Image: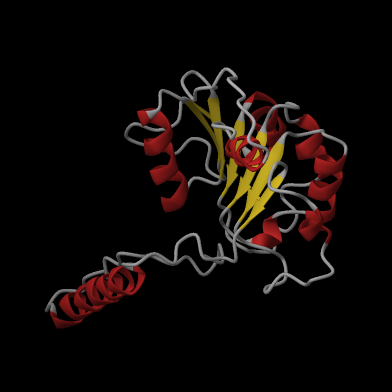
C-alpha cells in the first residue's frame, strides 16, 4: 500500500505514465496490536525503515530490549489506532480478543492508515472493517486470517478491489522453509523436554514455544 502497487498495476493495464510522488515509511508510525513473536519481528523490520513503533499489550510494564517507543495498555488501545499509519494485529484467538479490532478502533484511525491482520481472524470484526473501507474511514487493509476459513464466497470482503483490500488464504507464513522451520521448533522443544526429564534435579522445561493455559496461548 505504501508503494501504491495497486495504482502501478492499474497504470500498466491502461498504458498510463503516471509520475506521482512515492511515499516512504521513514518517520511513519507502526502500531502493533499484541506484542508476541510476530509483532517483535515486525517491529525490527519497521525500525529498519526508520518507523516509530508503538504497541498494545496486556502487560504494559513489561520491559523489552529495543522495545517499542511507546506501549499502551488494553484500555488505552484507541490511542494506538489514532497515532498509527499502519496497524498490524497479531493477536491470538481467545475469549478476550474476539472483535478486539472493531468499529471504535477503525473509526479512530487516520483516513490514510492501513490495517493489517496476521494473527487470528477472531480478533477482527469483519463487518466493521468492511464498513470502514466502504466509507473511506481508512485507506486500505490486508488480511491473511479470517473468522471463518476458507472465507465464504458470500463474504463482503470479496467485494473490494486490491486498491482497498488485499487478501491471502492464511498462507502468509506458508513459505518454502515452513516445514523445516516447524520441525526445528519441534526438535528443540523435544530436546528441552528430554533434558529436563533426564536431570536429577527438578528442572523446569525451557520450551522454545512456551504455552500459558490460563492465557489460552
Query: Given the current orientation, which residue lies at the most extreme front position?
Result: 15
Residue 87, by quadrant, is top right
Q: Position of residue 194 (x, y in %)?
A: 19, 81
Q: Residue at x 19, y 76 (%)?
A: 191
On the picture, is 34 further left or further right than 107?
A: left
Q: Is residue 152 above or below residue 47?
A: below
Residue 96 visible to an observer of this rendering = no
Look at the image and name its color scheme: secondary structure
Q: Is residue 92 above or below residue 105?
A: below
**Number of marks present in the image shown:** 0
Q: Is residue 141 above or below residue 168?
A: above
Quarter holding the N terminus is top right
Q: Position of residue 180 (x, y in %)?
A: 28, 72
Q: Position of residue 142 (x, y in %)?
A: 63, 48
Q: Position of residue 32 (x, y in %)?
A: 55, 39
On the picture, is 25 further left or further right than 98?
A: left
On the picture, is 199 further left or further right than 170?
A: left
User: Is 153 in front, or is 161?
Assistant: 161
Q: Residue at x 16, y 76 (%)?
A: 195
Query: Given the current orientation, which residue lies at the most extreme left position?
Result: 200
Q: Residue at x 40, y 27 (%)?
A: 49
User: Is 49 in front, or is 88?
Assistant: 49
Residue 74 visible to an observer of this rendering = yes
Q: Residue at x 76, y 38 (%)?
A: 105
User: Is 75 in front, or is 128?
Assistant: 128
Amino acid at each position: 500500500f505504501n508503494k501504491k502497487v495497486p495504482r502501478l498495476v492499474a497504470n500498466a493495464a491502461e498504458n498510463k505514465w503516471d509520475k506521482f510522488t512515492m511515499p516512504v515509511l521513514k518517520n511513519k508510525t507502526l502500531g502493533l496490536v499484541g506484542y508476541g513473536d510476530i509483532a517483535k519481528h515486525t517491529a525490527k523490520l519497521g525500525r529498519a525503515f526508520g518507523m516509530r513503533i508503538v504497541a498494545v499489550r496486556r502487560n504494559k510494564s513489561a520491559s523489552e530490549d529495543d522495545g517499542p517507543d511507546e506501549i499502551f495498555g488494553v484500555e488505552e488501545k484507541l490511542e494506538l489506532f489514532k497515532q498509527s499509519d499502519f496497524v498490524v494485529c497479531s493477536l491470538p484467538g481467545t475469549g478476550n480478543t474476539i472483535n478486539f479490532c472493531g468499529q471504535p478502533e477503525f473509526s479512530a484511525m487516520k483516513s490514510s492508515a492501513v490495517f493489517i491482520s496476521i494473527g487470528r481472524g477472531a480478533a477482527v470484526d469483519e463487518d466493521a472493517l468492511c464498513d470502514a473501507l466502504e466509507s473511506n474511514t481508512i485507506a486500505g487493509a490486508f488480511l491473511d486470517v479470517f473468522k471463518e476459513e476458507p472465507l465464504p464466497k458470500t463474504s463482503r470482503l470479496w467485494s473490494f478491489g486490491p486498491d482497498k483490500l488485499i487478501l491471502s488464504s492464511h498462507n502468509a507464513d506458508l513459505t518454502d522453509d515452513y516445514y523445516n522451520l516447524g520441525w526445528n521448533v519441534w526438535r528443540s522443544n523435544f530436546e528441552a523436554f528430554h533434558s529436563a526429564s533426564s536431570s536429577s534435579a527438578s528442572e523446569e522445561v525451557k520450551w522454545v514455544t512456551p504455552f500459558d493455559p490460563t492465557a489460552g496461548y
